[in-house]
């Protein structure tokens, strides 16, 4: 286990780095050099970042330093390193989606979130690994291979933002841009012992969004602390004309009231949402974390929330999108792809339009069930996933706690993509084997600030950022 060294920029929060940059006590060039050196040392063993451009990073850091010395107005993330998930468009930098089919694709424009990070002064240090077309909850692809978990390199970092989470956990930059269509931010955050936020849908604009799942997709931050997460959300939030689903409000400060506490907030705890199999040790760690809220001026109640197994809905919506995008590809293209993705797409290519419409109706019904539940509670706590990180080389476990499962049937995340609610995964604790376990905190739509306040209050009682895997 590593120890915190406050003199090492790689072990400092984005908040503290920004404070020192503004005070001219730490240079963006010094930060970039330290992070690049750490990437050189650790990334070959983790495979978290897959496209690197150190000379470009150094040039950006030098420009950032010149702005500080000139007394220019500085953005919220001025000089702070951030990695970008490899399915977000980056102008003039290749964006591969983890696919050999896209290995040479170089977008002509930035995704809205990337553009906002740049306007805030952040420095893009590299593209982070993702499973091919972000289709699964473990990160491995035919183009770059697997991303390994910094806490145990025999385990997956999760997915689909496994590269982003592994990079932040290992100190390869304090911030990472992530995407979440069914849990792709929160799953790897849980597995890697970091913070991952899926904001309210539309809080961060998306472009382009793959067809059929644009209602389910969310951009979001991954960081080591809740304050850094709120800081990054503040920088990225706001509308974009390219995303008709983006929310019109911008200029919100998600850091300002972070320490206001949650006294009097109505909180519920559900160990399984009615459908999730959970390993006993994972449940115990998450439940103990949930009851830490009892010391925060709230009363945690057992949730009377029983959602019928939604796995078939996930297959129709998420899997149906995979089928539409990939099942009819030419055989020559399929031969270059992840064979498990091809099999998944072809199997779900047999779905009918009737199956799809029934799944949409069932998704809407779950949304109404959740809306009614949140009429009585302000926050819901759950395990993020039903187990700690599983071994590499697997798409996902075939059973959890003795229960057979299918694609993502081990995750408590994806129903909140359907409802568009803000949900965050924070470290709840570590297993006897030293693997992180995540606690998921969910709030009502548009109440991202409350979710962050709750996460910050929990973090203050159960701090975790001093723990390092490397």
Image: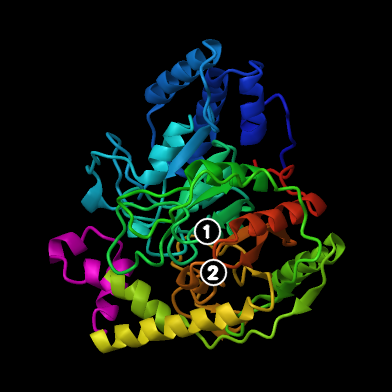
Q: Are marks 1 and 2 in contact (CB under 8 Å)?
A: yes
Q: Quadrant of residue 90?
A: top left
Q: Which residues are magenta?
A: 323-352
Tell me residue 387's x, y (percent).
Answer: 62, 69
Tell me residue 252's x, y (percent).
Answer: 56, 46
Magenta stretch: helix, strand or loop mostly: helix
Q: Can you say whether 255 is above or below 118 in the image?
A: below
* Residue under numbered circle 1: 198
- Residue 413: give its label: 2
Tell me residue 431's x, y (percent).
Answer: 72, 62
- The residue at 41%/45% (across/down) is 113
Between 243 and 167, the residue placed more toward the observer is 243
How many neighbours does mark 2 have within 10 angstroms: few (below 14), some (14-19), or many (20 or more)? many
Rounded to the nearest angstrom, the CA distance separating label 1 from label 2 is 10 Å
- The residue at 70%/48% (across/down) is 258
Q: Is residue 272 magenta?
A: no
Residue 394 appears in the picture as rendered: yes
Secondary structure beneath label 2:
loop
Question: 275 left or right of 381?
Answer: left
Tell me residue 218's x, y (percent).
Answer: 44, 58
Residue 152 appears in the picture as rendered: no
Q: Identify the image quadrant of the C terminus.
A: top right
């Amino acid at each position: 286990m590593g120890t915190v060294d406050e003199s090492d920029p790689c072990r400092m929060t984005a908040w503290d780095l920004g404070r020192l940059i503004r005070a001219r006590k730490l240079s963006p060039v010094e930060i970039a050099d330290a992070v690049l050196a750490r990437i050189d040392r650790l990334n070959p063993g983790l495979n978290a970042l897959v496209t690197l451009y150190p000379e470009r990073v150094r040039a950006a850091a030098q420009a950032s330093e010149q702005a500080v010395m000139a007394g220019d107005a500085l953005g919220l993330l001025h000089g702070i390193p951030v990695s970008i998930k490899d399915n977000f468009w980056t102008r003039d930098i290749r964006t591969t989606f983890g696919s050999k089919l896209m290995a040479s694709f170089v977008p002509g424009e930035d995704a809205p979130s990337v553009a906002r990070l740049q306007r805030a002064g952040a420095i893009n240090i590299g593209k982070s690994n993702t499973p091919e077309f972000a289709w699964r909850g473990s990160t491995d692809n035919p183009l770059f291979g697997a991303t390994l978990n910094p806490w145990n390199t025999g385990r997956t970092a999760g997915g689909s933002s496994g590269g982003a989470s592994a990079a932040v956990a290992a100190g390869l930059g304090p911030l990472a841009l992530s995407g979440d269509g069914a849990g792709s931010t929160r799953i790897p955050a849980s597995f890697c012992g970091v913070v991952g936020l899926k904001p309210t849908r539309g809080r961060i604009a998306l472009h382009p969004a793959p067809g059929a799942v644009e209602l389910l997709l969310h951009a979001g931050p991954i960081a080591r602390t809740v304050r850094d997460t709120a800081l990054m959300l503040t920088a990225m939030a706001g509308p974009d004309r390219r995303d008709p689903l983006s929310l019109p409000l911008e200029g919100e400060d998600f850091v300002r009231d972070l320490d206001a506490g949650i006294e009097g907030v109505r909180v519920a705890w559900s160990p399984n949402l009615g459908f999730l199999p959970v390993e006993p040790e994972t449940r115990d760690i998450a439940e103990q974390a949930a009851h830490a809220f009892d010391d925060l001026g709230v009363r945690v109640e057992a949730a009377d929330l029983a959602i019928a197994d939604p796995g078939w809905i996930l297959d129709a919506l998420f899997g149906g999108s995979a089928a539409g995008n990939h099942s009819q590809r030419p055989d020559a293209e399929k031969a270059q792809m992840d064979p498990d993705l091809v099999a998944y797409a072809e199997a779900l290519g047999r779905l009918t339009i009737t199956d799809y419409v029934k799944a949409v109706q069932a998704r809407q019904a779950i949304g109404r069930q959740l809306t009614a539940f949140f009429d009585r509670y302000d926050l819901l706590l759950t395990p993020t996933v039903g187990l700690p990180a599983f071994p590499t080389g697997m798409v996902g476990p075939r059973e959890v706690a003795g229960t057979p499962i299918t694609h993502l049937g081990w995750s408590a995340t994806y129903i909140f993509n359907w409802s568009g609610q803000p949900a965050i995964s924070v470290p709840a604790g570590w297993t006897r084997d030293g693997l992180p376990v995540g606690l998921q905190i969910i709030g009502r739509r548009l109440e991202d600030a409350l979710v962050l306040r709750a996460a910050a209050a929990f973090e203050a009682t159960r701090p975790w950022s001093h723990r390092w895997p490397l």
